Image (cartoon, rainbow, N blue to C red):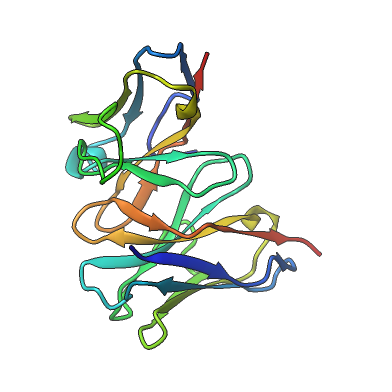
């Protein structure tokens, strides 16, 4: 069973770029039947899908964040990453990396999540 | 505001049955499978139901899912205090664009 682990700064200043990485252990990002994605959850609120990346580098982003989000994948390290530019306090949230199935909407493995606070 | 509509909260006594609804449209639930997730405070969501009504290995058969048209339902029978959690429905809106409901807090009285 794969395990996913997020890493990155827990504090980002307003207008700067939020950068997170996710390492997949006991699994491979090169599996053709899965996408790799990021989901966030502001404290006390619901889930929001940010985007997904395929091992080929193809990406799908939430339209509400398009223009600020870029995702990439490094198959040699079994890692994928998230960059979110021009952050504001509204981007403060728990950020989860996850494995998404390509044949149906289920998200079957999640990282433990990391809290990113946007504050000066 | 979430694309999928769930009741903010539901409650029932131990041993009873509770249902949680998830309402969408023809562009999301109407044309895609629905998943359900269970989330305890301070932890990541966990896949509970996929493809409308299938359970991953290890999920008790007390949890079941169904879908009809543009709505889906999660049912939990034989409620236990350990089932107290937040529950989210999810699906696609268009191809590979994930969306979620706003979440439902289950209280076991």
Residue A71 appears at what percent x and percent y? 44, 74
* Residue A7 located left or right of residue B77: right
Q: Residue at x 40, y 43 (%)?
A: B100
- Residue A16 appears at what percent x and percent y? 69, 73
Work out whether residue B47 or residue A13 is closer to the camera in this orientation and state it: B47
Farthest residue, direction right: A120
How many marks can you see? 0
Q: Is residue A93 left or right of residue B108?
A: right
Residue B8 pos. (x, y %) = 50, 25
Asked if A108 appears above or below A9 in the picture, the reply is above
Q: Is residue B23 above or below residue B45?
A: above
Residue at screen point 37% across, 57% down: A109
Residue at the far bottom: name it. Answer: A76
Quadrant in the picture for residue B56: top left
Residue B66 visible in the current orientation = yes
Q: Nearer the viewer, residue A47 or B86?
A: B86
Q: Position of residue B53 (x, y in %)?
A: 20, 36
Q: Is residue A104 above or below residue B81?
A: below
Please tell me in which quadrant of the rendered image residue B61 appears: top left
Q: Nearer the viewer, residue A32 or B84?
A: B84
Q: In this rendering, does residue B105 appear at all?
A: no
Looking at this view, is A18 or B85 the one in front? B85
Residue at left offset 34%, top offset 18%: B78
């Amino acid at each position: 069973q794969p395990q996913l682990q997020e890493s990155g700064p827990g504090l980002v200043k307003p207008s700067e770029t939020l950068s997170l990485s996710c390492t997949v252990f006991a699994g491979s990002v090169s599996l053709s039947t899965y996408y790799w994605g990021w989901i966030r959850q502001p404290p006390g609120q619901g889930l929001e899908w940010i985007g997904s990346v395929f091992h080929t580098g193809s990406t799908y982003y939430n339209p509400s964040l398009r223009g600020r989000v870029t995702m990439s994948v490094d198959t040699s390290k079994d890692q994928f990453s998230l960059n979110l530019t021009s952050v504001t306090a509204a981007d403060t949230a728990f950020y989860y990396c996850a494995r998404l199935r390509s044949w149906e909407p289920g998200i079957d493995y999640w990282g433990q999540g990391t809290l990113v606070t946007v504050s000066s | 505001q979430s694309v999928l509509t769930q009741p903010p909260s539901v409650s029932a006594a131990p041993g009873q049955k509770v249902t949680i609804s998830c309402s969408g449209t023809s562009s999301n639930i109407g044309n895609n499978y629905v998943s359900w997730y269970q989330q305890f405070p301070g932890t990541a969501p966990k896949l509970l139901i996929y493809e409308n009504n299938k359970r991953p290995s290890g999920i008790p058969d007390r949890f079941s899912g169904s879908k009809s048209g543009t709505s889906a339902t999660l049912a939990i029978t034989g409620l236990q205090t350990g089932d107290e959690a937040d529950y989210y429905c999810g699906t696609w809106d268009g191809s590979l664009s994930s969306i979620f409901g706003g979440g439902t807090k289950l209280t076991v009285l």
